[in-house]
Image (cartoon, rainbow, N blue to C red):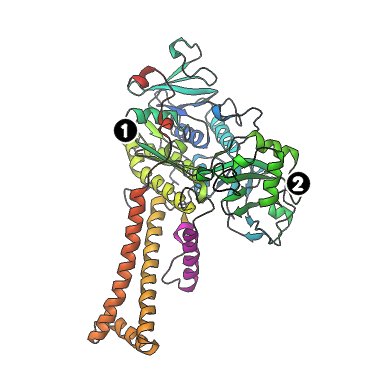
Amino acid sequence: VPTLSSRQAPLVSSRRVGTRWRRRGSRAVILASSSADAKKAVVVGAGPAGSLSALYLANLGWQVKVYERRAASGDARGADAGAGRPDISYNVVLSPRGMNALAGAGVTLPEERVVRMVGNVRHLPGAAPAVSRQFKGTVAVKRDALSDVIASTAATKHPGRIEFTRGYGVRDVDFARRVAVFAPSDAPSDGDLSADEDAVSAPYDLLVAADGVNSAVRSMLARGGDVRVTQNADEMMFKTVKLPAPSSDGGGSDAEEAARCFHTWPRGLVSMLAPPDPAGTLSGVIILPGGAYAGAHRGAHRGTWTWDAVADEDDVRALFEDKFPDAFNGAPVPPEAVAQILAQRPRRGGVTTHCSRLANADGSVALVGDAAHSCWPSLGQGANCALETAQYLAFAIESMPGDLTAAVKRFDEVRAPQVHACGRLSEAGFGGVAKRAGNFLFFAKIGLLALLNKAMPFFFDKPALANINDPAWAYDDVEDAVAQETQALAAFGGVLLAASIGVVVFGWERFIGASIGAVKAIALGEGTRADEGAALAALGSAAAMTGLFRWLAKRRRERRKGNMSPAVFVSPSRGGAAAAA
């Protein structure tokens, strides 16, 4: 029976027995020998999550076939492609959480294809850039390069166990017979698959859907009632642009160090993010508001930059002069950058995908990556969460090698609450649909907690979100800790409020005397009736503030609804088993 190496940490944490799998810094690799009766897996999508799922399953002895609709990395993606559109593969930032998932499968990223970041440079208007160590310890890598490295590792380790087929997209799935049908991506979507000589039928024991935020497999499951899906879109829209190597960060570090930093240009609703490339350049992501602001140059929000207002070369140059004048080290926007921007269609800044479950009822289909739980990019968890989900799926199967249905059910029970929490935390980081620059209160709370931690470390821990990149912390554990620290702040605020009222009403001397009496009444049960009254007033204020914060948090959860079009869930197939179902 395929098992984890003996060096692997236990799958069940003593911290919360039976509900969490932990990987506390382990670098053990799941290994297995091939066998004639190996189970068969079909993976839809060869992105990072799909490729890593395939590698983990092959490590467990499975025979795996991976189908990817793009013919090669960097190809334009279907209907989103525009004529002359350049490669728009973007950079992802891998934290220890994502790196741990890669290491668990035996993936090592080549140094020449990544940048190990040392900090963050914030380019502020009218001031010198501000340098911090915020991104220190994280790794920037092109998404396509990450997929290629994982696929290459899989092909090298398991030449007879994993097969990648590119240029083929899923067209239909017969969930009852466990057969997926694939056809060339350039074939008509409404064609007769039975007459298509190039169509491929792939039987499976496990179908892993890793086909992205607009997953075709997920839409088929949704049509059959196996999963309920809501999606909530950030209204911001983005395009990418290649930026030159920074001359320096302007804040005391040299150009070499600046080239290993994550650069940001925060401008309210308008912003630009630029992780570094191995070549020393930066991969810029320009973010402009959409939604209510679309057409702003013609309507109520006149003066707000949107992509509707960027139609030609002059508009591009005006945008950079207004918002990002130092992006090209003080030089004008070069023609190739102008062409790159104008050739693209703006894309959504982020979509939260919430699936009621991450698997179907009989355990033959599992959802991973953006197909299962895409999220807004505010906390940088998209790729990291996707890679970790592939790891969780493998751990579930490894823990129950003789019962696939129970294993996939267990995967869903454990992982679904975690990824749902990740989605909620990521949305909170942007404070709502049209506040892409960030929620002021959200970040103000983090800053206040950091100050209180330094001033009173015996009472306040460091902000819970500081643990979000730690693989030892599940996302729902982080969310629980965030709620607890909010309640602690509410109680602290209640005490301060009561103290302020007491000082105003009674004066300092009487208030201090009453406070000492209240402490005695609470701690020792001693004191006068006045002392007991002061104690009740303080505790009541803290309880009232805590209750208010809890009610507000519950109201936000209950009112959350997806805002994506139902058209997302329409199966691309016009017939066949899935449509008949």
Residue 256, percent across and down?
72, 53
Of badges 2 and 1, the one in the foreground is 2
Q: In this view, does 84 lie to the left or right of 548?
A: right
In the orientation shown, which residue stands out farthest toward the right? 331
Residue located 62% across and 36% down the image: 88
Q: Which mark is residue 293?
A: none
Residue 52, percent across and down?
50, 36
- Residue 517: in sight, yes or no? yes
Give the amino acid type for the residue marked by disc 2 in the picture: Pro
Q: In which quarter of the image is residue 122?
A: bottom right
Residue in front for this viewpoint, 143 or 562: 562
For label 1, the residue is 405
Q: How far apart are marks 2 and 1 (CA)?
A: 59 Å
Residue in front for this viewpoint, 191 or 267: 267
Give the amino acid type for the residue marked by disc 1 in the picture: Thr
Residue in front for this viewpoint, 312 or 216: 312
Residue 486, percent across and down?
39, 62
Q: Quadrant of the C terminus?
A: top left
Residue 563 sits inside the magenta stretch = no
Q: In this view, does 190 lie to the left or right of 326?
A: left
- What secondary structure is found at the residue carrying circle 1? helix
- Residue 207: in sight, yes or no? no
In the orientation shown, which residue stands out farthest toward the front? 299
Above or below residue 172? Residue 2 is: below
Magenta stretch?
439-466
Q: Residue 332 carries which label?
A: 2
Residue 59, percent across and down?
47, 34
